[in-house]
Image (tube, helix red, strand yellow):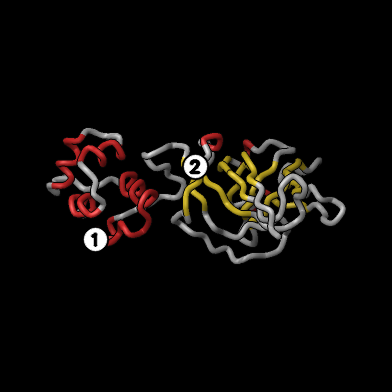
Amino acid sequence: MFRLAEFRRDKKLTQKDVAEMFNCKQNNISIIENQKKDLTDAQMEALIVLYGDSVKSYIDDIDSVSIEKGRKPVVGDYLLPYYDVDITLGFDNIMNDQTTIPSYYLNIPAFKNCDCAVPVYGRSMTPDINDGSIVAIKEVSLDSVLPGEAYLIVTDEYRTVKYIRTCKGDPTKLRLVPKNLEEFDEMILDKSKIRKVFMVKGVITNKIL
């Protein structure tokens, strides 16, 4: 149970302030504070977005909080969750260590239809996607992949961003094509090895010096 009244007093917020934050009626806040109703996951996530992990100190049972990957906070459906995971622009093997809670959120309305943003490293996609860039991605089905577009491909061995093209004569395989063909070769990949695929919807350049 989240101690909303205590949290609100400590932050010098009125019930009206919290109601506007959650986009609900003020009476709902009163009901929550009387402990007749707990916060929803989306409301809890909205507080974490605005106030950080310190809000967890007001939770009596922290195991009751569930923050789902990619869920948009109620304070703005264009807030894009950023996950600090390892994405390589090459084909190097990496530790497949996933994180479930965003490091922070990016306020970019143009990417409101994306699932999340992740950093990418390497030179195989330059100059289209530079080393250290952040890509906004949206998960798609393998059947809906558009040849020629850039995708984040996830297998058991690696996560990499490449242009996807069809493999003529073999519909069970795909070609992963880098932009920087002077330094990197393309790769043939069995579709059966792909666990997930995300379309790259946007790129935020972050130059590494």
Q: Label 2 to label 1, Cα distance in Å?
A: 30 Å
SS class, disc 2? strand
Residue 183 percent across, percent down from the top left: 84, 56
From the viewer's perspective, tell me whether residue 68 is left or right of residue 131. Answer: left
Determine which residue is flagged by label 2.
107
Image quarter in which the N terminus is found: bottom left
Please name the residue that numbered disc 1 is placed on.
Answer: 61
Q: Amino acid at mark 1?
A: Asp
In the rendered image, is residue 192 in sight? Answer: no
Task: Give coordinates of residue 12: x percent, y percent.
Answer: 23, 49
The amino acid beneath tag 2 is: Asn
Q: Residue furthest right?
A: 182
Mark 1 surroundings within 10 Å by alpha-carbon count, few (fewer than 14), some (14 through 19), many (20 or more): few
- Work out whether residue 67 can be spotted: yes
Which sits in the foreground, 11 or 55?
Answer: 11
Q: Residue furthest front?
A: 12
Which residue occupies 65% across, 54% down? 120
